[in-house]
Amino acid sequence: MNIKTLSLIVLTFFLFNCGYTPMFSSSSQTKLNIEKFSISGDRDLNNFIEEKVKKFNDKTSNKKISIIAKTNYSRETQTKDKSGNTTQYKLKANVEFLVTVNNTTLEIDLNESLSMNKLNDEFEQKNYEKSTKDQFSTIFVNRLLINLSRIE
């Protein structure tokens, strides 16, 4: 009985102390000195991206960054029923980041898309699209941070 207990304790010790920490946790030290940030394109998507990028802005950081972004959002008809009414949309978002870090320029082009069924309530559909834009912006900012962390 003692060997089983000791084995279980040692096994849990090694499993829970492997040193894993999430990349984007609240204790993450991802801080950037964003000197210039300009964005154009879709207003809602721009607001969400700008809000998320501001969280990582820290004027004391040594890495000085300039970001110019251009967003594009579209809702296209994907399928129609027999009478010609739209039943499904394809939501597409595209962001082109032009990042300058210490005289090094990097161009990052990111795309996301999602299929959405048409909702009967127009208000609910607009809310769903807005929350989708928020999710897209989260994905875009996370990918931007990953690319920025690769630059020395």
Image (cartoon, rainbow, N blue to C red):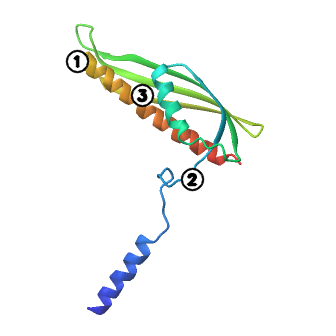
Q: Position of residue 130 (x, y in %)?
A: 37, 25
Q: Secondary structure at mark 1?
A: loop
Q: CA distance from mark 3 to mark 2?
A: 26 Å
Q: CA distance from mark 3 to mark 1?
A: 19 Å
Q: Amino acid at mark 3?
A: Lys
Residue drawn 54% across the image and 40% down it: 143
Residue drawn 25% across the image and 20% down it: 119
- The answer to which quarter of the image holds residue 4 is bottom left
> Compared to 76, does 66 lie above or below?
below
Q: Secondary structure at mark 2?
A: loop
Tell me if mark 2 has few (under 14), some (14-19) or many (20+) residues whose alpha carbon lies within 10 angstroms of its own.
few
* Residue 95 appears in view: yes
Q: Position of residue 43 (x, y in %)?
A: 48, 20
- Mark found first going from the N terminus, 3 or 1: 1
**In the image, farthest residue toward the top:** 83
Of circles 2 and 1, which is in front? 2
Q: CA distance from mark 2 to mark 1?
A: 43 Å
User: Which residue matches tag 3?
Assistant: 133
136 displayed left or right of 108: left
**In the image, farthest residue toward the bottom:** 2
Q: Position of residue 52 (x, y in %)?
A: 50, 36
User: Which residue matches tag 1?
Assistant: 121
Q: Secondary structure at mark 3?
A: helix
Tell me if mark 3 has few (under 14), some (14-19) or many (20+) residues whose alpha carbon lies within 10 angstroms of its own.
many
Q: Amino acid at mark 2?
A: Gln
140 displayed left or right of 57: left
User: Which residue matches tag 2?
Assistant: 29
Which mark, residue 111?
none
